[in-house]
Amino acid sequence: MKTADRRRPRPGADILRTALRRNLGAMAGGTVLMGLYQAGETAFPIALGLIVEHALRDRSPAALGLSIGALAVIITTVSLSWRFGMRVLQKANTTEAHHWRVRVAGCGLQPVARDVDLKSGEVLTIATEDADQTADIIEVVPLLVSSLVAVAVAAVALGLADPRLGLLVIVGTIAILSVLAVMSQRIGASTREQQTRVARAGAKVADLIIGLRPLHGFGGNHAAFASYRKVSTDAREQAITVAKVHGAYEGVALGLSAVLATAVSLTAGWLAFGGQITIGELVMAVGLAQFIMEPLKLFSEMPKYVMIARASAERMALVLTAPPAMVPGTRHPTPGGGLAVDAVRYGSLRGLTFEVPAGDFVAIAAYQPRAAAELASVLAVRVAPGAYEGVVRVGGQALADLSIEAVRAHLLVNPYDGEIFAGTLRTNIDPSGTSALVAEAVEASLLTDVVALHRDGLDYAVRDRGANLSGGQRQRLSLARALAADTDILVLHDPTTAVDAVTEQLIARNLARSRRGRTTIVISGSPALLDVADRVLVLDDGVITAEDTHRDLLANDARYAAAVAR
């Protein structure tokens, strides 16, 4: 995995163009149907004018029946074209939003450039709200075109009655859109700032949830909550600002549309009073003046949605176009191989060197928690190989030369705070539904009591972040997932800190038995886990200072005994 070259970020406009190009077929069909809907809506007051002009003048049953039939056709066309047009567009919108969510989530699983400065909460906001708002462009364009069709049909119909009426509609529409185009720029700037502040608040929440326990430990929770209150207040104030801008925009749009409709109605009345248009044409003009407010309102809202979509696309571009901190290699490790760390320098690690042969069960007792966390980060490839000195080898191959897929297939690093997601116990243990070791993993992690406690067993519903489970249950569930993955090399970081001593002892024995013959590394200070390991490596001041069995170290190393004895 080599350090990536810098690439010029692709702007959000490219993302919007990609979304539009990918959905040309659906948009063409939706545009035709929505255009037909708007044309039908416009045809309704025109038909009423013709009925007044001809049917009531002739006063024949045939003319009345023909008029009723024509209105029925128009109403049916309006109803069906709207229903199927929106169905086509919303399906394309939903599919496109899902596509971008998957893309952003995929990038979130890869390290991104350091200068992007996006946290997990911000990436989550981009993958949800921004992906949805970007995909809205697929509906915006057809609705924009269909609204234009309605205004054009109305202008032509009024122009046929009297050119001055048609010209009034055209000039008024251009004036309205010119004013709103200027206002939409303000909406775009305000929306981008709001999205940024909301994402920061989301990132702050994610940080608080992860660090709540240690914050309570040293009394820093009040300062942390105050920090969140500040970013939350900023996001709220910006949301209020955006709402005011939106309100002003919609008020101006509605007011200008009403002024245009009033001008058309008054002009038509004046022309009818002077005998320049007929009563039927007056009815048509008044009807169109009232109707034209809807497409004008829709037409005027489109620039606002375009600006919102572009702002969201620009934020997605931060993730999608950010160069990865490392370029994955192409090699694959030897199946069933071991793990070697050679002269690694990173953070508090000072030339760390050790080797775990294939099939060994090794425990690492780290005297400094920071060193343990940094070692776990290096092994989990959360730190790019180019960001530290030294080499990590998996199955005889340098980590930098392996593909991400190969690393994940052969090496699993399970953190002490493994994520629990909404679903069931079963889907948390075996997300892919392909593991043959679910039952063994449940037994080894001592999750059996949780399964037996609920009538649904493994199908018991789990809330997001395991909100309906205790800390110990969440930790055992995370351990069961790691065991069910059955990787060649398994690294566990403090897997039993939230369970009682008796449970910890049983889990340690089960773990050693279930992983017999598979390469296993446990980074922990737990005496139970240290005791079942084939050997213990003592990590002190960034290097390995001692290596022996747990019991021999207890007997011969006073500092070790003081550090791990409970």
Image: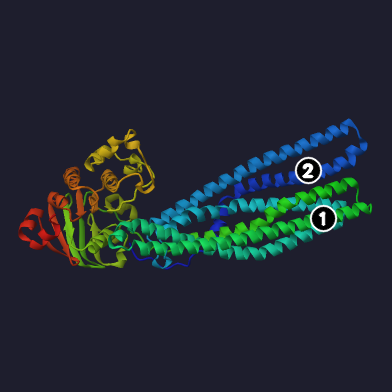
In which image quadrant can residue 377 be found? bottom left
For numbered disc 1, what is the local secondary structure?
A: helix
Question: Can residue 11 be seen by looking at this rendering?
Answer: no
Q: Which of these two is toward me, 3 or 461?
A: 461
Q: Could you say which disc has been placed on residue 44 in the image?
A: 2
Q: Quadrant of the N terminus?
A: bottom left
State whether residue 345 is above or below residue 505: below
Q: State the residue at coordinates (58%, 46%).
A: 90
- When the figure is inspected, residue 97 is found, relative to residue 173, above or below; the finding is above
Q: Quadrant of the C terminus?
A: bottom left
Q: Residue furthest left?
A: 556
Residue 552 numbered tag:
none
**Residue 240 drawn at (x, y percent):** 56, 61
Disc 1 residue type? Val
| Label 2 – label 1 distance at C-alpha | 17 Å
**Sequence-first tag of 2 and 1:** 2
Amino acid residing under circle 2: Phe
Q: Check disc 1 and report the residue beneath it.
A: 264
Q: Is residue 216 left or right of residue 119?
A: left
Residue 290, position as x, y percentages in the image: 77, 50
Q: Is residue 467 visible?
A: yes
